[in-house]
Image (cartoon, rainbow, N blue to C red):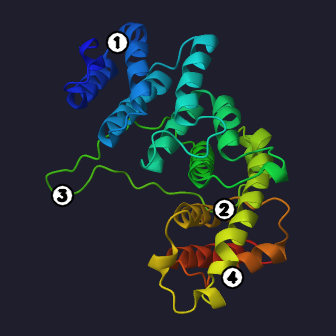
Amino acid sequence: TLDLSSRKKHSLALYPLVTCLLCVSQKQFFLSRWHIFLNNCLSNLKNKDPKMARVALESLYRLLWVYMIRIKCESNTATQSRLTSITSTLFPKGSRSVVPRDMPLNIFVKIIQFIAQERLDFAMKEIIFDLLSVGKPAKAFSLNPERMNIGLRAFLVIADALQQKDGEPPMPNTGATLPSGNSLKKKKTYLSKTLTEEEAKLIGMSLYYSQVRKSLDNILRHLDKEVGRCMMLTSVQMLNKEPEDMITGERKPKIDLFRTCVAAIPRILPDSMSKPELIDLLSRLTVHMDDELRLISQNSLQSLLLDFSDW
């Protein structure tokens, strides 16, 4: 079956089958075989057929869960090598996007979460820092909306899981629906209280937290300049314009990123942004052209005022 999976014919059906067989196999069998199939998956992530790229991504997503969570990796060197080959394909260094394109960002977020479960330092320094352009000089800084969205969301998910002592993330399901029509998905609650430096230290994230806050500050300022101020309902340029006509092309992923960044407040407070600046930004966004961003900024502003009454 493994040999057949490298053939193009029937690969859409074979990939899930091979993935399933590997996922239920015993540890030694899995470790001796999975790398062959992993390489097939990695090469198919760039497949021109989006269906095939999606199937390869879904397979990789499940195999990685087994490798990181069930089997708990291999030796440090072998694990590092495997993870590097996976992450350099999914998140190529220096690229503005991720591979494959136009896939649900949540899958990428989960992949980083699985890696962080056993290799937090690798997930933070090698993946999230790169996605968030941490340490990039101001002149070289540019917005890569999809990458940044994934990086920030992954950080929030990892920090939440550590703080809530969630334990291991469950194996990805296929979104199965019960006969009653209800899905098996468990409702996840996210923390909204500000993550303090002390709490970050307690969950082993203090080394990374300040960098993420600096990055959030940088991203917010760039977004405000590019799709914030100029897209307020009070702006002359937006008069008589419909949101669906304006939130298109390059603006769309930027608005998506803006939503994630604003929703992250006050959980993460942007570093070096003063209180008046932050309140001004959120207040302005309550009259933004994007209705979802308006709602998110209202909620963040409300949480901020409740949590920081001294402001």
Categorize mark 3 by other alpha carbons within 10 Å: few (<14), some (14-19), many (20+).
few
Q: Mark 2: which amino acid? A: Lys
According to the image, label 2 marks what residue? 193
Q: CA distance from mark 3 to mark 4?
A: 41 Å
According to the image, label 4 marks what residue? 284
- Pick the quarter of the image with the C terminus: bottom right
Q: Which is nearer the N-term, disc 1 or disc 2?
A: 1
Instruction: Tell me if residue 95 can be seen.
Output: yes
Q: Mark 4: which amino acid? A: Arg
According to the image, label 1 marks what residue? 26
52 versus 158 height, above or below: above
Instruction: Tell me if residue 285 can be seen.
Output: no
| Left or right of residue 134: residue 267 | left
According to the image, label 3 marks what residue? 181
158 versus 257 height, above or below: above
Categorize mark 1 by other alpha carbons within 10 Å: few (<14), some (14-19), many (20+).
few
Total label count? 4
- Pick the quarter of the image with the N terminus: top left
Residues at discs 4 and 1 in contact (Cβ within 8 Å): no
